[in-house]
Image (cartoon, rainbow, N blue to C red):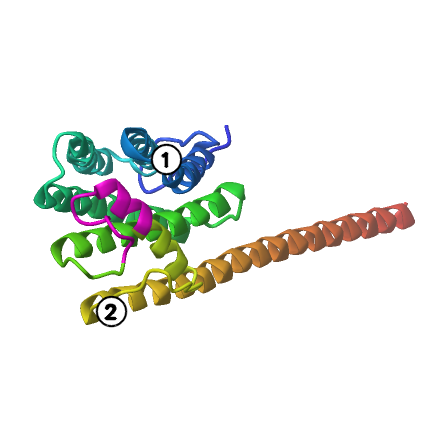
Amino acid sequence: MPSSAFKFSKMSIPIPKFSFHILLTSLILLIIIPPHLTDIVGKVLTMVLFNLVMLASLYVVAQQKRTFYIGILLAIPTVLVGWGDFYSSAHLANYLRALTLIAFFGFVSFHLLKYLIKQLHPNTEMIIAAISLYFIIALLWAMIYVSLEIHYPGSFNLKAGIDGGDLTGLINELTYFSFVTISTLGYGDISPQTTFTQGWVVLEAIVGQFYIAIVLARLLGLFVAEETAKEAEKNHVKEMLKKAQSTHKDDGTHH
């Protein structure tokens, strides 16, 4: 049965074929849909999509008992404090929500990167996993920016009315900014206002560029290596056939 399982140990559990597709789809929906909605509908849908991303992430990376338990321990408080946006908009509560998301996305990023490094054969799932990791890194940085804005108000020049008490608005704005930064588009409508924040922004831009370069090199290297191996195998088969034919002719001559 085709699978893209993490083969780290005998405890590994095969991952169904389309798990990475589900993760990427949920990430795209999280990025595209919430900014178009406001008020209670936007908040509910943002939390639902965040939870969907978290479930899809856990399903993909938590393939060992220890990893699964760590993922659950990170996911439960993240979900609980995430839904807390409906009963509290205090800056401290929102700051804790941002921190739990940073921890969770950091955990997922580490294991997806581990998966990409350990893969020896290029396939569609590996490409989808690489794209998903790129998105998750951007979300990780978005949560870092959210925590900075809450802890140090005025770290970014945001739209009027968006502050540390509006978690959904902050997430939408700074997720957009994070993707613009990691792809080095730099529109300039949102920009860092403190030296400390500027350092994080520069670091994300550097990580984004190196990630693309390294992943592309990795994928190309694997594809080239696989094609070379296939060609070598074909040549070996041809040589064996030639030898077999030559031996057969020699036997016929002796007869």
Q: Position of residue 176 (x, y in %)?
A: 37, 51
User: Relative to residue 74, is residue 246 drawn left or right?
Assistant: right
Q: Does the magenta stretch include residue 170?
A: yes
Residue type at the position of mark 2? Gly
Q: Is residue 46 magenta?
A: no
Dot 1 corresponds to which residue?
A: 37
Q: How many labels does the image show?
A: 2
What is the span of residues highlighted in magenta in the rendered image? Answer: 158-173
163 to 28, vertically: above or below: below
User: Relative to residue 8, is residue 162 drawn left or right?
Assistant: left
Dot 2 corresponds to which residue?
A: 199
Q: Residue at x 27, y 44 (%)?
A: 169
Quadrant of the rendered structure where residue 144 is?
A: bottom left
Q: Which quadrant of the rendered structure holds the C terminus?
A: top right
Comparing labels 2 and 1, the label whose residue is closer to the camera: 1
Q: Earlier in the sequence, mark 2 or mark 1?
A: 1
User: Relative to residue 40, is residue 5 drawn left or right?
Assistant: right
Nearer-the-camera pick, 9 or 166 = 166
Residue type at the position of mark 1? Leu
